[in-house]
C-alpha cells in the first residue's frame, strides 16, 4: 500500500485538528452545564477572577462537593411532571 504524499497527510492532520477543536468547543458548554448542576447553591458558578492557567480553570469548573440536591429540588417544585406522564 503506497503512503500518502506529505501534502495529503498534512491536509488530513489539519482537518482532524479543526474538527477536534470544534468538537471541544461544543462539549465545553455541556461539561459546564453538568458541573454547575452538581454544585451546591453556595458555590460560585461564575468566578470573578479570571483563572491564572488551565488547571485552575478546571479546578473551578469541577464542584468541590458534588450534590444531587438541585435535581431533587427541581423534581419536587416543577409543575411540568404531570405533562410527561399523560
Image: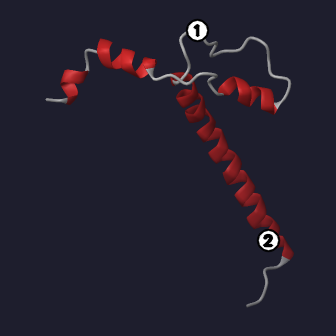
Mark closer to the observer (2, 1): 1
Q: Quadrant of the N terminus?
A: bottom right
Q: What sort of colour scheme is used for the picture? A: secondary structure
Q: Position of residue 11 (x, y in %)?
A: 78, 65
Q: Residue at x 80, y 32 (%)?
A: 54
Under tag 2, what secondary structure? helix
Which of pointers 2 and 1 lies earlier in the amino acid sequence?
A: 2
Q: Give the image quarter of residue 8.
A: bottom right
Return the residue at label 1. Answer: 42
Residue 44, placed above or below residue 19: above
Residue 9: mark: 2
Q: Give the image quarter of residue 46.
A: top right
Dot 1 crowding, Cα within 10 Å, few <14, some 14–19, many 20+ = few
Q: Residue at x 79, y 26 (%)?
A: 56
Under tag 1, what secondary structure? loop
Residue 67: mark: none
Q: Residue at x 79, y 71 (%)?
A: 9
Tell me how far mark 2 sits from mark 1, CA to CA.
50 Å
Residue 25, placed above or below residue 12: above
- CB within 8 Å, label 2 to label 1: no
Q: Is residue 30 left or right of residue 22?
A: left
Q: Position of residue 29 (x, y in %)?
A: 59, 32
**Farthest left residue?**
86
**Farthest bottom residue?**
1
Q: Nearer the viewer, residue 51 or 69?
A: 69
Q: Residue at x 55, y 34 (%)?
A: 30
Q: Is residue 58 left or right of residue 63?
A: right
Q: Give the image quarter of residue 27.
A: top right
Q: Is residue 47 left or right of residue 41?
A: right
Amino acid at each position: 500500500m503506497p503512503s500518502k504524499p506529505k501534502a495529503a497527510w498534512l491536509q488530513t492532520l489539519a482537518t482532524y485538528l479543526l474538527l477536534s477543536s470544534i468538537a471541544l468547543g461544543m462539549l465545553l458548554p455541556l461539561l459546564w452545564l453538568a458541573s454547575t448542576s452538581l454544585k451546591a447553591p453556595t458555590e460560585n458558578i461564575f468566578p470573578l477572577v479570571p483563572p491564572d492557567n488551565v488547571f485552575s480553570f478546571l479546578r473551578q469548573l469541577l464542584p468541590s462537593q458534588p450534590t444531587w440536591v438541585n435535581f431533587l429540588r427541581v423534581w419536587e417544585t416543577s409543575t411540568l411532571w404531570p405533562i410527561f406522564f399523560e
